[in-house]
Image (spheres, rainbow, N blue to C red):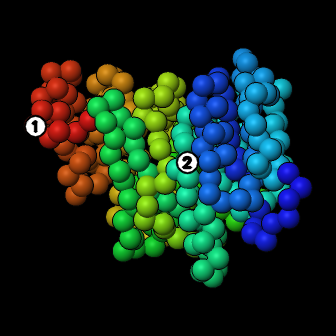
Amino acid sequence: MTEEHTTPLVTAIITAYNRPTHLRSAVQSVLQQTYDNIELVVVDDHSDIPAKHVLRDTDVTSLSNCNIVRHDENRGANAARNTGITVASGEYLAFLDDDDQWLPKKLERQVQAFETAEDIGVVYTGIRRSLPDGSEIEIPPPLEEEMTKALLCQNVVGSMSVVMVRTDIAQSLPLDERFPCWADLEWFITLSTETTFKRVPEPLVVYNCNSPERLSRDFEKANTGRQLFVTKFEPLAAAYGTLFQRKMRGWAAYRAGKSAFHAGLYERSRQLFVSAVISYPFEPKFGTYLFASLGGQQTHKLARLINGYRT
């Protein structure tokens, strides 16, 4: 770990909580990177089995540094990420949820993007979603509007695992620890008001949709996230005009409604989809999901057959 490097140090921050098998796989994906100057910071958010024990047989000697930090109590994903930012030494920070994995060239491609462009603070990549019946690749499209405006309605960046952020920017804009869900989207919007984003159109992250305890599956957390999101960002959305403000509220209700819909909470999802349609009746998805929720499980199944969208 004392080898001299001429490339910038990248700190890989893995947040971990009670998924020891996934954690080992996430760390292995860091060790398999083609980039050669990596500091690993694992933040254990008070797992039942400490991360230090889970990783004690993992050989990390190829890394420039390795630091495992454990919270004294469970504090949530954003608190764990903020801890990682605080202890990081790298010029750039790359985040990895413990149930995701990086493909080998992920960090190399992102550092290249930073080094070949000026005045950017965030680089993000495409993603490969691991689904029960296979996988699908999602490449973020080029944006036709400014990043902040796009993010206020949809997460056009992806998960935390796809981003690399300049450390000085991350340290000046900590994540909002109140958010139990939508935490990544909240931070991306905050970052977008202060810096420029650059996309790498390659799927360099594997997102495990089969993982237990994905936050998006917990409706109560999603609904709390929606309420916090609207309260925090409505003034920013209002700066784009009243119609856009309504559009932002519609998309927030739609995202929370989908969480309820996929959890089988059809009455709750109907309420949110109605709110989405009333707020912004010009988006066809809102009405489609409202229809699919009307008859509960039966129309849910019918909509899947007609439209082919996944639950």
Taking the image as shown, residue 273 lies to the left or right of residue 77, namely: left
| 155 in relation to 59, above or below | below
Relative to 171, is 267 on the left or the right? left
Mark 1 or 2: in front is: 2
Q: Mark 1 points at which residue?
A: 306
Residue pictured at 49% horizontal, 24% vertical: 212
Instruction: Look at the picture and state if 24 lies above or below 229.
Output: above
Q: What element carries label 2?
A: strand
For disc 2, the marked residue is: 102
Q: How crowded is mark 2: few (under 14 residues within 10 Å), some or many (20 or more)?
A: many
Which quarter of the picture shows residue 43?
Answer: top right
What kind of element bears circle 1? Answer: helix
Query: At label 2, which amino acid type do we have?
Result: Trp
Query: Does the image show residue 100?
Result: yes
User: Left or right: 41 with respect to 205?
Assistant: right
Which of the pair 179/37 is nearer the observer?
37
Q: Which of marks 1 and 2 is nearer the N terminus?
A: 2
Residue projecting furthest to the top: 48
From the viewer's side, name the closer residue of 237 and 189.
189
**Image coords of residue 24 (percent x, y):** 64, 31
- Quick one: quadrant of the C terminus? top left
Q: In this view, which residue lies farthest toward the right? A: 2
Give residue 167's position: percent from left, percent from top: 75, 62
Q: In this view, does 275 lie above or below 113?
A: above
Residue type indicated by callout 1: Ile
Q: Which of 208 and 195 is in front in this view?
A: 208
Residue at (48% x, 66% y) in the render: 200
Splitting the image into 4 quarters, where does residue 23 fall? top right
Residue 129 placement (x, y as % from top left): 40, 43
Q: How far apart are marks 1 and 2 (CA)?
A: 34 Å
Point out residue 55 in the picture as x, y percentages from the top left corner: 74, 29
